[in-house]
Image (spheres, rainbow, N blue to C red):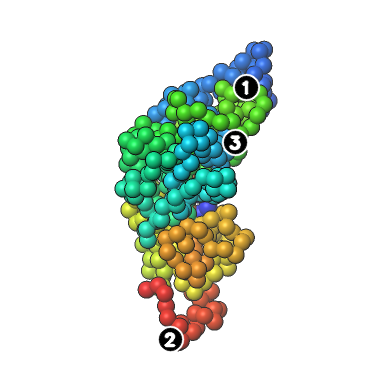
Amino acid sequence: MTAYFDNAATTKMGRAAIEAMLPYFDEVYGNASSLHSMGQRAKEALEEARATVAACLGASPAEIYFTSGGSEADNQAILSAAKIGERKGKKHIITTAFEHHAVLHTLRKLEKEGFSVTYLTVGEKGNVSAEEVAAAIREDTCLVTTMTANNEIGSVLPTAEIGAVCKARKVLFHTDAVQAVGHIPVDVEKMQADMLSLSAHKFHGPKGVGVLYARKGVALTSLIEGGAQERGRRAGTENVAGIMGLAAALKEATAHLAENMKRVTALRDKLIAGLSRIPHSVLNGDPSARLPGNVHFCFEGIEGESLLLLLDDAGIEASSGSACTSGSLDPSHVLLAIGHPHEIAHGSLRLSLSEYTTEEEVDLALEVIPQVVKRLREMSPIWREKTEGKKPFLLP
Ligand SMILES: *Cc1c(COP(=O)(O)O)cnc(C)c1O
């Protein structure tokens, strides 16, 4: 038996999404810009998908732009706001220290071009308040970009409150909702978001397709020049099959949101309760304002990479938390942002669940993880020094 606990990295596709895509590979494969009837059928399907997505987000179809995924949507949102700001002489941006690299690296690029960026610190529980955002807004602030929910430690930010602050202060507000859409309620009106990013493969749709929502009146800059697709904001022949899969997956997730949240939260809490019994460990992230599918721990005295390999041998597919950081020796920027020393940050484990997660998978994880942590600790010279009292324990 294998247990898949890496849904924050990507999810398996649902049947509804797969079936929605199939006709667009070999039956209605026309280019949506072609004038013949097959092209027009593709175009109609595309516009239907746009309306479906808009309805799920509380937006209007003209505010939906299809992209190649969450990263592109984040890049386009931030670079567009920077362009708008620059024209008005406003070159200050506010974000948080624990954003996805698609946001952070785009901002680093802007810093090199003379923008200044405030990185709001996130507290021990990994959250920020709307008051902190309000306090950071300056005369020259052109954008606030804060994620709806964190991909590593699962904290859910007070996005509607942050949106209200931005609206009152007339600052553009973007939220990276890639981890939130399909998992918790997301509504662009309630959040007062001017721009919002989402990605299909995080909610059982296909990889390589996403959406940038941009409120009417927000002038998007295109990242890719070429044809007039997506109303001139995103050139390139539309990924019609992928877009159909995205819309079907979003519709499915939205229709079953309440029941899925309830089921997944119960499994999450069972995992958290069980793993909390491991001594010298800590649950990261906000215990209550938390994604239904996120479990994230640090275990003192172990190496996250070794833990993942042994878990994989036992059939458990998990993550240290950051796909972008694995392979490098640097600990996760998110765990450092919530104040963990390197030693603790290295011993992290993220289990991310979905509506496909079963009770059996959870039970397997609860049986295997405590054993593997124990085994790794027994092999560690540092752990021996700690148990012999030569070095202090950092976690209770
Ligand atoms: C996965 C993810 C992204 C990137 O989305 P892609 O579609 O994989 O490019 C951006 N932000 C967050 C929070 C994510 O979890």
The amino acid at mark 1 is Ala
Q: Residue at x 47, y 23 (%)?
A: 61
Q: Earlier in the sequence, mark 3 or mark 2?
A: 3
On the picture, is 310 further left or further right than 97?
Answer: right
Q: Quadrant of the C terminus?
A: bottom left
Question: Mark 3: few, some, or many residues within 10 Å (few <14, many ≥20)?
Answer: many
Q: Nearer the viewer, residue 97 or 135?
A: 135
Q: Is residue 95 something one can see in this rendering?
A: yes
Q: Which residue is mark 3?
A: 68
Residue in the picture at 54% in, 48% down:
111
Q: Residues within 10 Å of mark 1 (few under 14, many from 20)?
A: few
Residues at marks 3 and 2, CA–CA distance in whole angstroms? 53 Å
Disc 2: which residue: 389
Would you name the residue on which mark 1 appears? 228
Residue 378 x/y as whole percent: 52, 79
Between discs 1 and 2, the one toward the N terminus? 1
Q: Are marks 1 and 2 in contact (CB under 8 Å)?
A: no
Q: Position of residue 268 (x, y in %)?
A: 40, 54
Q: Name the residue at the top extreme.
A: 36
Q: Nearer the viewer, mark 1 or mark 2?
A: 1
Residue 368 appears in view? no
Image location of residue 301, percent across then percent down: 49, 74
Is 308 on the left or on the right of 191, as rendered?
right
Position of 119 with respect to 28 (left or right) is: left
- Identified at 52% across, 25% down, the residue is 49
Label 2 neighbour load within 10 Å: few <14, some 14-19, many 20+: few
Up-down relation of residue 19 to residue 355 (above or below): above
Ligand 1 has an atom within 8 Å of the beta carbon of the residue at disc 2: no
CA gap, disc 1 to disc 2? 68 Å
Front residue of 189 and 274: 189
Foreground residue among 110 and 321: 110
